[in-house]
Image (cartoon, rainbow, N blue to C red):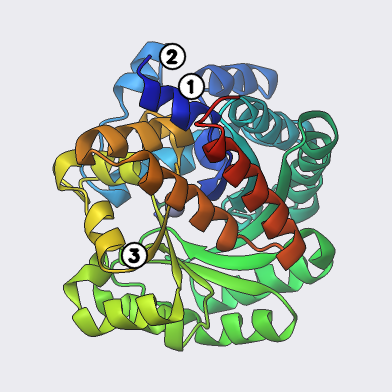
Amino acid sequence: MTAISRFIEGLPKAELHLHIEGTLEPEQMFVLAERNRIALPYGSVEELRGAYDFENLQGFLDLYYQGMRVLLEEQDFYDLAWAYLERVAKQGVVHAEIFFDPQAHTTRGVAFSTVIDGLHRALRDGQARLGITAKLIMCFLRHLDQDDAMRTLDEALDHKDRIVAVGLDSSELGHPPSKFRNVFARARNAGFLAVAHAGEEGPAAYVWEALDELGVARIDHGNRSLDDEALVRRLAKAKTPLTVCPLSNLKLAVVTDMTRHPLKDMIEKGLVVTVNSDDPAYFGGYINENYQAVQAALDLTRAQLAAIARNSFEAAFLGAAEKQALIARLDDYVGRGGAA
Ligand code: ADE
Ligand code: ZN
C-alpha cells in the first residue's frame, strides 16, 4: 500500500451519500434469499456480480430494485445496515447519513415500521459498539407520483425523531424536482431537512429547481452544475455541498474515464465537494475506494483529501459542537502526518 493510500485509510471522514439498499452485497443477497425463500434469477454470486455492467442509471436501478426483494423482515434491514457499519468502521468513517427508499419496500408489502425499526436498531448498535454516529434520510422515488410521496411522508411523521431529512432519488430524466414541490414544502414545515439527487443525468436546470423549489441543503451528485456558470457561482457563494460519487459516476457512464472526473474542476471553482460511495455493492467500492480512485486519477494531494474530509463534516446534519469535535479529530490526524 502506498503512503497516500494509508493516509486515506485512516482519514476520519463522514459518508453523506449512501443508499443502504445499495450496500446489499451479492453474498448477503443469497443468504437473505434463502432465509426468506425467495428465488433469485441467478445461479451464483459470480453470475450475479457478472450482471453488474450498467449502461446508465436506469440499467442499474432495474437490478437494484430487483435485488432488494430479498429484504422482508426487520432483522434483514438490521443485518444490512449492520454489515455496512462494520465495514466502514474500518475505513475511517466516523459519521454516516444514510438514505433509505421506503416506497421500494412498502410497494412490496413490507411495512414502513419494519424497515425503519431494523435500520434504526443497527444505527443504535453502530453508535454503541463501533462509535459511529449515523442518521437516516428518507428518499422519495421520483418515478412515482407526488401523491405516493405524500402518503409516505404521512407514514414518516410517526417516526419523525428517527429521520433527519427527506431526499429524492431514482430515475432522474423526465422527473424534475418541481414535481415534488408540495411534498418537500410539507416535509420542511414538519421540521425535516431536505436534499435531492440532481444533475447526475439530468440538466443543470434540475439543480436550480432542487435549490429554489425544494429548498435543499445539499445536492446529491450535482455533476451537471458545471454546465452553468451562474449556477456554479450560486453554489459556491452559498457553500451548498455536493455529495459526489466517483465510482458510481464511472459505472453509470456519467463520466467516461476517472481521469476526466470533474471533482478537481469543482474544487478549483470553489464548490464544497464531498466524496461518497452511493451504492457500493454495485459500483465496486466503499468510501475509501472512492477516495483512492479519484486521488489516483486526478493526483489529489493530502491537503485536498483532508479538505474533502473536512467538507464532509461541515456539510453533515450535525450541530456546531459535534462538527467541531469531528474536525478536531481530523486536524489532529493530519497534524500527526496521518499516523493512526
Ligand atoms: N438510487 C440508488 N442510487 C441512485 C443513484 N445513484 N441515483 C438515483 N437514484 C438512486
Ligand atoms: Zn445516490
**Is residue 43 visible in the rendered structure shown here?**
no
**Is residue 1 visible in the rendered structure shown here?**
yes
The N terminus, quarter of image: top left
Q: Are marks 2 and 3 in contact (CB under 8 Å)?
A: no
Marks 1 and 3 sit apart, C-alpha to C-alpha, by 29 Å
Q: Amino acid at mark 1?
A: Pro
Question: Callout 1 environment at 10 Å: few (<14), some (14 to 19), or many (20+)?
Answer: some
The mark nearer the N terminus, 2 or 3, is 2
Frontmost residue, 228 versus 280: 228
Q: Which residue is mark 2?
A: 45
Frontmost residue, 263 versus 248: 263
Q: Position of residue 276 (x, y in %)?
A: 45, 46
Q: Amino acid at mark 3?
A: Gly
Does ligand 2 reach within 8 Å of label 3's beta carbon?
no
Q: Which residue is mark 3?
A: 222
Q: Which residue is mark 1?
A: 26
Q: Amino acid at mark 2?
A: Val
Q: Are marks 2 and 1 in contact (CB under 8 Å)?
A: yes
Residue at 26% from the left image edge and 75% from the top image edge: 204
Question: Callout 3 environment at 10 Å: few (<14), some (14 to 19), or many (20+)?
Answer: many
Label 3 residue SS: loop
Label 2 residue SS: helix
